[in-house]
Image: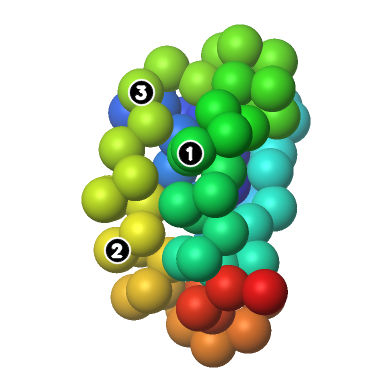
């Protein structure tokens, strides 16, 4: 995960500048949103967080099984 112009996005190539955050999968995304972990991970510079878009990106992106794209821990 990284912060892009649209807010928090999945950074598959790990090339966005600044801080990043790791999620093990879609299950952890729900927990991170509930705990408001993105604000802490990105030091308050998250912009908008759309859990639906992030979940879809995690499910459909490269390596959709396992780290950063699986179903959770």
Looking at marks 2 and 1 on the same chain, the residue that comes earlier in the sequence is marked by 1
Q: Label 2 neighbourhood size at 10 Å, few (<14), some (14-19), many (20+)? A: few
Q: Write down the quadrant of residue 63 in the picture.
A: bottom right
Which residue lies under the disc numbered 2?
56
Q: Pinpoint residue 15: horizontal percent, then vertical percent.
A: 64, 46
Identify the disc placed on residue 48: 3
Give above or below for 19 relative to 29.
above
The reply to whether the C-beta atoms of the residues labelled 3 and 2 are less than 8 Å apart is: no
Q: Pinpoint residue 41: horizontal percent, then vertical percent.
A: 70, 29
Tell me the SS state at disc 3: loop
Residue depicted at x 27% and y 50%: 53
Looking at marks 1 and 3 on the same chain, the residue that comes earlier in the sequence is marked by 1
Q: Given this view, does label 1 or label 3 mark the residue nearer the observer?
A: 1
Residue depicted at x 63% and y 84%: 66
Q: Pinpoint residue 2: horizontal percent, then vertical percent.
A: 57, 39
Residue 63 visible to the viewer:
no
Colour mapping used in the image:
rainbow
Which residue lies under the disc numbered 1?
33
Residue depicted at x 36% and y 59%: 55
Where does the C terminus fall, quadrant-wise? bottom right
């Amino acid at each position: 995960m990284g912060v892009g112009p649209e807010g928090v996005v999945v950074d598959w190539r790990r090339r966005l500048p600044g801080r990043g955050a790791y999620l093990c999968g879609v299950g952890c995304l729900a927990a991170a949103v509930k705990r408001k972990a993105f604000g802490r991970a990105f030091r308050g510079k998250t912009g908008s967080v759309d859990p639906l878009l992030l979940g879809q990106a995690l499910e459909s992106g490269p390596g959709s099984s396992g780290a950063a794209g699986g179903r959770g821990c």
